[in-house]
Amino acid sequence: MPESVVVDVNVNGVAYQREIEPRLLLVEFLREEIGLTGTHIGCDTSYCGACTVTLNGRLVKSCTCLAVQADGGEVCTVEGLEQNGELHPLQEAFSEHHGLQCGYCTPGMLMASKSLLEENPSPSREEIRKGIAGNLCRCTGYVNIIKAIDAAAVKMQGV
Amino acid sequence: MRQDTKFTNQNFRVIGSRVNRPDGMDKVTGRARYGADYDAPGQLVGLFLRSPHAHARIVSMDISRAEKLAGVKAIITADDLPDLTNGNREMLDILENSMARGRALYDGHAVAAVAASDVKTARKALKLIKVEYEQLPHVTDVDEAMQPDAPVIHDWIFTQGVNPTPKKPSNVCNRTEMGHGDVDAGFARAAHIIEKSYKTEQTHQGYIEPHACVASMGPDGSGELWVTTQGHFAYRNVCAELLGLDIAKLKVTSSEIGGGFGGKTHVWAEPIALALSRKANRPVKVVMTRDEVFRATGPASSTSIDVKIGVTKKGRIIAASAELRYADGAFPGPWAILGAMTSFACYDLKNVKTVGYDVICNRPKVAAYRAPSAPMAAFAIESTVDLAAAAVGMDAVDFRIKNAAKKGTLSSYGVTYGPIGIGPTLDAAKNHPHMKAKLKKNQGRGMACGFWFNFGGQTCSTINIAADGTVNLSVGTIDVGGSRASLSLIAAEELGIPYEHVKASVADTASLGHNDMTDGSRGTFSSGMATIVAARRAIEVMKERAAAMWDIPVDKVDWKDGHAVAKGKKNSKLAPLSLKEIAENSPNTGGPIAGHNEFVADGAGVSFASHLCDVEVDPETGATRIVRYTVIQDAGKAIHPDYVEGQFQGGAAQGIGWALNEEYIYGEDGRLQNPGFLDYRIPVCSDLPFIDTQILEIPNPDHPYGVRGVGETSIVPPLAAIGNAISNAVGLRMTHVPMSPPRILAALEAGE
């Protein structure tokens, strides 16, 4: 295996080229190589979902994805949800409906919810429950997270 | 002079409103910085080598090859950590738990740590450390650890609390007895006596953020620590004592905290990170893996509990007793004591006795987990209370109402209650719409009560008024559940300014006096009380400044709705001065305006809850689904109702996980078999129902606003409420938590 490889990854609309070790995880690339610490590590085993981002539009758990797998691809993280200084409706809804306590799961939860609403713009509560079942929250009992996703869905439908 | 902090039943302007939390924006945008989100220039990576054995003597350790590896800057073993604790065994325990001293006491116990220039080098160095272990007999089960032939883990533990103190060491470190009256006489007069034994398995707080810190020690003995913690002042004091530092020269800054639930009240890797930094003379960053969090931080006790309840024909509990055995892990703790104290706290009992045994075993040192020790005791007691109700043919709620503690009750742990909420929560439960919901096939309804003490503790807050009339509120209690919002509301209420004009921050240890940790549901209670006093003191200063601006005596100045108001006919033409106007003039009237308060926040009000729960048990698989769940709890006064409800829901969700799935599973070899979220299964969204809440407000007489702590009680009733519901669904009394599908299925099969 080579000592290092060069990867080109577009993160939140910005092109990054880095020389990295082939074993580097995508989450390490995001946090350590380009300094985006909004993507969190909770379990190292793709179970908790705190590290959830999208790669080429699909949800991935960046702790079990190599950075080289993102070579030539587009990654969106929580830092990329804001567009032109405007919060994403999900960010607004999580803030207004108290869809967080400690906030550690929030970035991953936001990414998972965004993906859910892209696939299903008006999910039922049951569909929301299943849609974010890959993301652990230990603080809220998920009650206000469901309310927030519900509210964001309504708002996004209205636009 | 200490300010009066009695309840005054004042009218509120902003208290009770559902404002957005000040930290919310940073948390939804990824700007919030947690333990692992900070780097220091030139920092090294710190990693730990951990014991693969449950109990082993460290015969020898060779670090020479690791030391020679390029990029390795420091290695720490017990040899680098002299005992500076002056005979304080509790502190030595903390040091020994951070790094094994000659013996590894549990699977995951740290035996060495490395600081290297990068993670790859650090990992390589760990592999080069050669440790020769001699495996020793181990014990991980609490009942087995109490047996006379059990391997004795510490030769220095002689059971405390028995007279005379035993001459032989054992694993039982403490016996505690609580209660009053004469239980034997009470049982003799009982119409029915119910006796039952229970077990609960070990659980972990399961915060999603692993422990993380950046430690930086300078050659002058000064240091800094950035860390995720529930108590940065406590971390400072402990680390300073263990490492021989001057307390004031160690500055600890708390990061945003990604959940703690008690597990971040205790140091684990932090003293070692500082020791590595001191040895390497470079900053060192340590971030635990999830595997390390499970194996080597502080889960809750596993327990074994016997309960005996005697009732009269009319349904009055005439005697109650319990023996509670709590596994403390490798070092002593107060865990059975808390279990013994909380056991029967919900009831008005003439004859009650609880005996707690704290037991050492080869598991990690137990730490607090949300209302520590109470959920297990409540499982045993509240399951037996349901059996007692059934024995006299009474409804479970009516039976509890009849026996509930009230104002004036001598509690089972020795205090006499003031106004308390157990009766009101039970009345609310009886009348709740939940009770009328129809149950389907294989479904059952259960309920249970819970109690937690709450705590006040050392606290100080400071208010600084900026020149434009906005306000900095500096507090020393970590915000784990939205306290920056609740404390900003309190400051705004007192000062008469909008909530948005207050900026609350958790100050570092160099910027504020000592504050105890955020534990005991004390954040909003104690820092809130300190903030009220600090604000009132700032108002006194502002009244003086207004008097100076008006050139009138200060006793002619009142404070009303955020304004200084001149009193008396003579001054009737003086227009009120706003806080903003006074602040703008402060450079000319005496300089900066501040108010501060330092005290021990006495008078934390006890807290009670009643939970209702409907379950559906699948007879094919033994799986239990929570169909409906309602939390009713006394908050004293809900400063921010959404965040109070959030605590109710979060505690219930953790309790549901504890009741149904979560457990540490140890193999015959004494090693933890499920140190990850895949096999230690905490509830995901689709596992839980919408948890309904009802806030009651029975004011705490010893807080100006009537506040009681709300963070912990909500985890106390779920185990029992679910056990009772399962019993009502399938006619089986589950006595072993978690009531996981295999256990329920086995019970169903045995029942058939």
Image (spheres, helix red, strand yellow):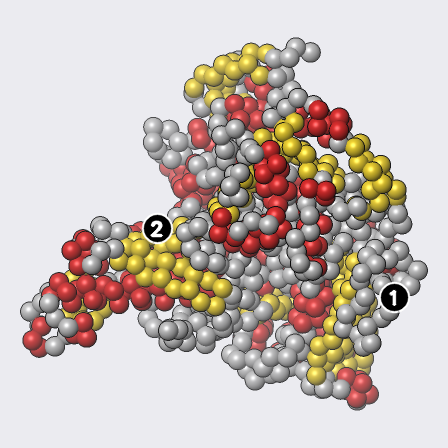
Q: Who's the residue at 76% across and 86% down the image?
A: B182
The reply to whether callout 2 and callout 1 are in contact (CB within 8 Å) is no
Task: Name the kind of residue labelled 2 in the image.
Answer: Lys
Left or right side of B129 for A137? left
Distance from Cα at disc 2 to Cα at disc 1: 58 Å
Q: Chain of mark 1?
A: B
Q: Which mark is residue B186?
A: none
Task: Name the kind of residue labelled 1 in the image.
Answer: Lys
Q: Who's the residue at 66% across and 37% down the image?
A: B289
Name which quarter of the figure residue B347 lies in: bottom right
Q: Secondary structure at mark 2?
A: strand
Residue A46 in sight from this viewpoint: no
Instruction: Count neighbours of disc 1 (C-alpha within 10 A) and say few if under 14, some if 14 to 19, many if 20 or more.
Output: few
Q: Secondary structure at mark 1?
A: loop
Of residue B41 and residue B249, the one placed in the foreground of this image is: B249
What residue is shown with label 1? B168
Q: Who's the residue at 52% across and 28% down the image?
A: B42
Left or right side of B139 for B589? left
Of residue B734 and residue A81, the one placed in the foreground of this image is: A81
What residue is shown with label 2? B503
Is residue B696 shown above or below B112? Answer: below
Name which quarter of the figure residue A155 lies in: top left
Q: Chain of mark 2?
A: B
Quarter of the image for the N terminus of chain B: give it: bottom left
Is residue B450 shown above or below B363? Answer: below
Name which quarter of the figure residue B288 lies in: top right
Instruction: Count neighbours of disc 2 (C-alpha within 10 A) and say few if under 14, some if 14 to 19, many if 20 or more.
Output: some
Of residue B729 and residue B87, the one placed in the foreground of this image is: B87
Say whether disc 2 or disc 1 marks the residue closer to the N-terminus.
1
Of residue A32 and residue B278, the one placed in the foreground of this image is: B278
